Amino acid sequence: MITRTVSKNPRTTRGDLVNDLQRAGTKVTKATNSNTLRRQGLKSCSARRVPLLKPVHVQARLKFAREHLDDPEEDWENVISSDETKIELFGKNSIRRAWRRKNAELHPKNTIPTVKHGGGNIMLWGCSSPKGPGRLIRVKERMNGAMYREILSDNFLPSARALKMKRGWVFQHDNDPKQTVRATKEWLRKKHFKVLEWPSQSLDLNPIENLWRELKVSVAQRQPQNITALEEICMEEWAKIPATSLSSLFANQC
């Protein structure tokens, strides 16, 4: 009964199981329930947070997957992606684990400094391809369509030239409103960008997401203490990323 209940509703708590069994006339402790489920290969884990997908989003993702299922790897090597991300000074981007001895949890080496509201953060825009990283810049104001187009003009196009993308390279970005407004679409058309059609609610599919994760880990390891240092370290760590690393990151995503 226990296994059947959690198979039907994986978010059933141990307390729920105790109450259900008690109503059925059986008294079983939480520990017994846990041990029984563990023997069946089931353990309690934090539920992953995923985008809320409507049927139209599911169909769009399925259509995208089918259209690109047989694309050769060389095609993806000619895609250059852009995206934005937020990096916090202190908080969830910081290192969260430390090897320590008993009763040493408060030793400065084993702690992470925190301040209220995370101590501030910076927004970054960057682009990259399997050939290597493009430019990385800090976005100091709230980005709108006009600013986005200016960033593409001043930073994306020079990045594409510096990366020596092959003729017919493809531009990939997500479906943020500033990227899909008519003015931006018209600008991309006039610049003769070949834009990869991208399904909505698919931020996790952008290959550059892997790169952001690597950057945040590297920055956190250096433990910047103020916003100025945070920005400097982000730029330094971005510049260290080798093209060989990017090829494997993009291959794993695509």
Image (cartoon, helix red, strand yellow):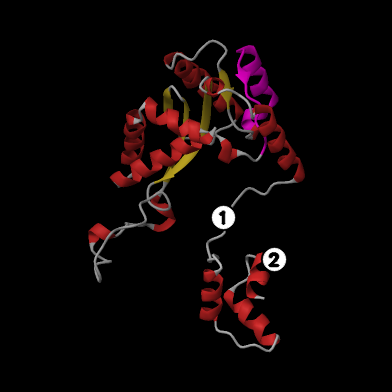
Segment tinted magenta in the rendering: 178-200
Circle 1 packing at 10 Å, graded few (<14), some (14-19), many (20+), is few
- The dot on residue 48 is 1
Q: Is residue 230 magenta?
A: no
Name the spot of residue 54 as percent of width and height, x first. 74, 46
Q: Is residue 209 above or below residue 8?
A: above
Q: Is residue 216 visible?
A: yes
Task: Write down the residue under mark 2.
Answer: 8
49 and 63: which is toward the camera:
63
Q: How many marks?
A: 2
- The dot on residue 192 is none
Amino acid residing under circle 1: Arg
Q: Is residue 245 above or below residue 105?
A: above
Name the spot of residue 218 as percent of width and height, x first. 34, 41
Name the spot of residue 223 as percent of width and height, x first. 30, 47
Q: Earlier in the sequence, mark 1 or mark 2?
A: 2
Of badges 1 and 2, the one in the foreground is: 2
Dot 1 lies on which element? Answer: loop
What's the CA distance linking mark 1 and mark 2?
18 Å
154 and 253: which is toward the camera:
253
Q: Quadrant of residue 202?
A: top right
Give me the residue at 51% from left, 22% from top. Answer: 77
Left or right? Give the position of 87 relative to 196: left
